[in-house]
Structure formats: C-alpha cells, structure tokens
C-alpha cells in the first residue's frame, strides 16, 4: 500500500499561543508531522516584531488567528477553540495565562481531555519561576555551560541549540505527545510543565554518568567529550578552515592514524589523559599541512570519523544533505525538511501558512463561527506566491 504524505500526527489539533524561543519550535515540529496547528497571535499593531513574520521559519505549516486577548470577546473565541483542541501549548511567564482567564483550570474545565503544555525557562514553581532568562541562563545553571569551550577562555556559547532547542522545544513536543497518549487512553487531560532548566540537566545525563564513574574532570577541555581528547576535537587546516575528529573507538583511531601517516605504536594507551596534550599538538601539526578539503578527500570512504566543519552556506550543498533532501527552499527561504522520517506516514513538505479567510473546513474543525474567523484570521503571512517547496 502506498504511503500518503500527511504525517503521523494527522488528525491531532494543536492550539498554540504565540511566544518566542522553544514554544514555536515545538509547534513547528508538531505541524511538520501532520498536526493541525492553529497559532494565536496578538493583533498586528501590538505584536513585537523580533523576527520578520514573512521569514520566520519556525512559524511554518500553521494557520494563524490574531486575537487581542485583553478583550472579552477574543478570550471567548479562544475558549471556543480550546474545546476542539487535543493539545494547547504556551510559552509565557507563569501566571500570564491565568490572568487572561485561559490557564489550565479554565481550559480543562472547557475540555477535560486537553493536554496543556507549558514552556518556560525555570518552570512553574521554584525561586526563579517568575524571573526572566534566556537559553544561556538555563544552560549556565545546569552545570553544562561550564564544560563547553577552550579552557583558556570563558565558557563558549553553543548558540541556542541546547536550552531552546533540545531542552525546550523538543522536550515540550515529546511531553505533550506522551500526555496525549494518556489522555486518549483515559479521557483525562493534564498539565505538562516543561522547563528548559530541567531539560538542560536531563540532556547532560551522559556527563553525569561519567562524573559518577570518576571519569569527568571539572577542568574544561580535559575530558573525553569536551575537546580534551586528541581523537575527539577539532583541528585547523592549512587554509584556516577546520575538521572535526570523532574517532573514539580503537578501530576508528587506527584509521585516523593511518590517514595521517602516523605510526600506531606511538599512540597506544589512548585513554591515558596525561598523553592527550602532547598527542593533540602532534595531530595539530599534521592537520596544518593540508587544506580542509584535501584532508576530507584523504579520509573519504573511511571510518576515521573526520568531517569538514561547514559554514551555513556550505552545509546545504554537501552531497549527503543533497541526497537526503535535508534542506528545502520555500518561497526563497532555505530551511530544514521535516524530521524524523516515517515509512508509513511521511510528512508533507513545508508550506507557507494558509490564507484561511474562506477555509470552511478549518472553521468547522475548530468550532469557530465563520464571522469570527473572517474577523481575526491573518490573511497574509509569507508572500502569497507559490506554496511549493523545492529540494536543495
């Protein structure tokens, strides 16, 4: 039987209250995999334009309503939508949704099966719950930021990939889907309290394991996974570009040394940390003799775990990404294709948010009177040209 490109979450309705950071990532992940996500945003005149709405990739695959939730009529429209939702996600500070009369108590009274996902930095309770913060703050408090970077420099900032991404948006998507399984089995919804500060600690579980085994030092750049090991780090090449080396296993290390033209007998006892600085300096000398691409050609087809460190313009052109169509282009905007991939229910390619002014099916699914939809629906979200996505 031929698979239908609709995604495994087809039929799941998600009501997303607009926020910054990880909450829209969770909304994108759910929408990419086929959920019908309706995003509630503030009126255009009140909306904070941190990102250009016509270029914000995290908002793709949604329909959008502009609601001024300070107004009673708009709050009533939101409660109407809650009755039809399977999942609600919000990323506001604790107490904000309650002040809008759209907190868990009110929404679960409207829809007892609702999964109410709450995305914050510090969680719904705790001494810091009401405080502001960003990715770097949550990561700092987890103990993980301290471990990242050159030991001679302050801790390095790993973009916003850790707290906003893995510990935030992905954890929220995982949490609400787990709760949805429970709701469908029992008929009872619940609140999912997703805190990036919790998630950063959780993502560090392997580091906590190494520490418990006595194999982790708090001295940055001296451990197996923080760049301290000569076989798990980055090296500068003759052209100033870099390669990443991840040859942890002995078999991979042998292939690494063979490609570098170094004798294996000089690199025994690979886990002896006292030898790492000297050996790293030796490998640095060798890598500096050729360009990055020359080294990648040297290691092509091997399991030495040597990869080029690509920049943002190079990455979409790499043959592996092109073969898997990892990057796509939608209306001139380069972005990631939906992931992960499913054999029976593949996700559809991304599309621009709908102009749902006359979308009767949408109104019917959400129980929203067409008059309200016409009054609130955002008509133009990305440039209304072709909705087709092209593979890079």
Image (cartoon, rainbow, N blue to C red):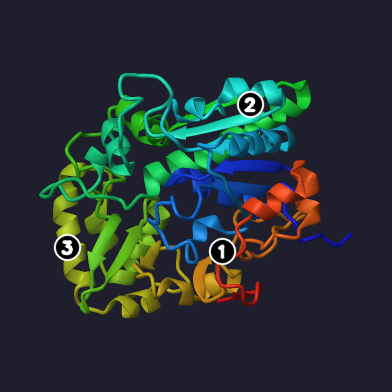
* Residue at image coords 29%, 60%: 264
* Residue 340 in the image: above or below residue 224: below
Asked which quadrant contains residue 308, the reply is bottom left
Between 79 and 199, the residue placed more toward the observer is: 79
- Kindly identify which residue carries mark 2: 107
User: Which numbered marker is on residue 218?
Assistant: none
Q: Earlier in the sequence, mark 2 or mark 1?
A: 2
Query: Which label's residue is closer to the chain start, 2 or 3?
Result: 2
CA separation, marks 2 and 3? 62 Å
Residue 93, percent from left and from top: 41, 32
Q: Which residue is mark 3?
A: 282
Mark 1 surroundings within 10 Å by alpha-carbon count, few (fewer than 14), some (14 through 19), many (20 or more): many
In the rendered view, would you say 365 is above or below 265?
A: above
SS at badge 1: loop
Which residue is labeled 1 in the image?
381
Q: CA distance from mark 2 to mark 1?
A: 28 Å
């Amino acid at each position: 039987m031929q698979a239908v490109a609709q995604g495994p979450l087809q039929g799941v309705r998600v009501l997303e209250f607009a926020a910054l950071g990880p909450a829209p990532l969770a909304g994108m992940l759910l929408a990419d995999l086929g959920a019908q996500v309706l995003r509630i945003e503030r009126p255009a005149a009140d909306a904070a334009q941190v990102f250009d709405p016509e270029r914000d990739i995290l908002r793709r695959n949604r329909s959008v309503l502009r609601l001024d939730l300070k107004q009673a009529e708009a709050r009533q429209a939101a409660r109407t939508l809650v009755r039809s939702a399977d999942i609600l996600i919000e990323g506001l500070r604790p107490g904000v949704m309650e002040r809008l009369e759209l907190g868990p108590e009110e929404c679960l009274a409207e829809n007892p099966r609702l999964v109410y996902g709450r995305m914050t930095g510090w969680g719904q309770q705790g001494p810091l719950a009401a405080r502001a913060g960003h990715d770097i703050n949550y990561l700092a408090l987890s103990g993980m930021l301290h471990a990242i970077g050159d030991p001679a420099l302050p801790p390095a900032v790993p973009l916003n990939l850790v707290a906003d991404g893995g510990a935030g948006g992905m954890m929220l998507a995982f949490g609400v889907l787990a709760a949805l399984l429970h709701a469908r089995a029992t008929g009872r919804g619940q609140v999912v309290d997703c805190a990036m500060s919790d998630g950063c600690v959780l993502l560090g579980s392997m580091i906590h394991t190494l520490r418990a085994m006595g194999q982790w030092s708090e001295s940055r750049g001296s451990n197996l996974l923080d760049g301290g090991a000569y076989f798990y780090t980055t090296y500068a090449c003759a052209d100033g570009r870099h390669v990443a080396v991840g040859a942890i296993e002995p078999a991979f290390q042998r292939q690494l040394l063979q490609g570098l033209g170094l004798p294996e007998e000089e690199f025994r006892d690979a886990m002896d940390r006292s030898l790492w600085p000297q050996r790293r300096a030796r490998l640095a000398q060798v890598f500096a003799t050729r360009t990055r691409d020359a080294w990648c050609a040297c290691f092509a087809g091997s399991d030495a775990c040597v990869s080029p460190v690509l920049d943002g313009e190079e990455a979409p052109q790499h043959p592996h990404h092109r073969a898997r169509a990892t990057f796509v282009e939608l209306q001139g905007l380069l972005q990631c294709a939906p992931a992960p991939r499913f054999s029976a229910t593949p996700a559809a390619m991304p599309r621009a948010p709908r102009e749902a002014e006359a979308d009767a099916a949408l109104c019917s699914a959400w129980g929203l009177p067409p008059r309200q939809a016409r009054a609130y629906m955002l008509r133009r979200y990305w440039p209304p040209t072709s909705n087709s996505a092209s593979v890079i």
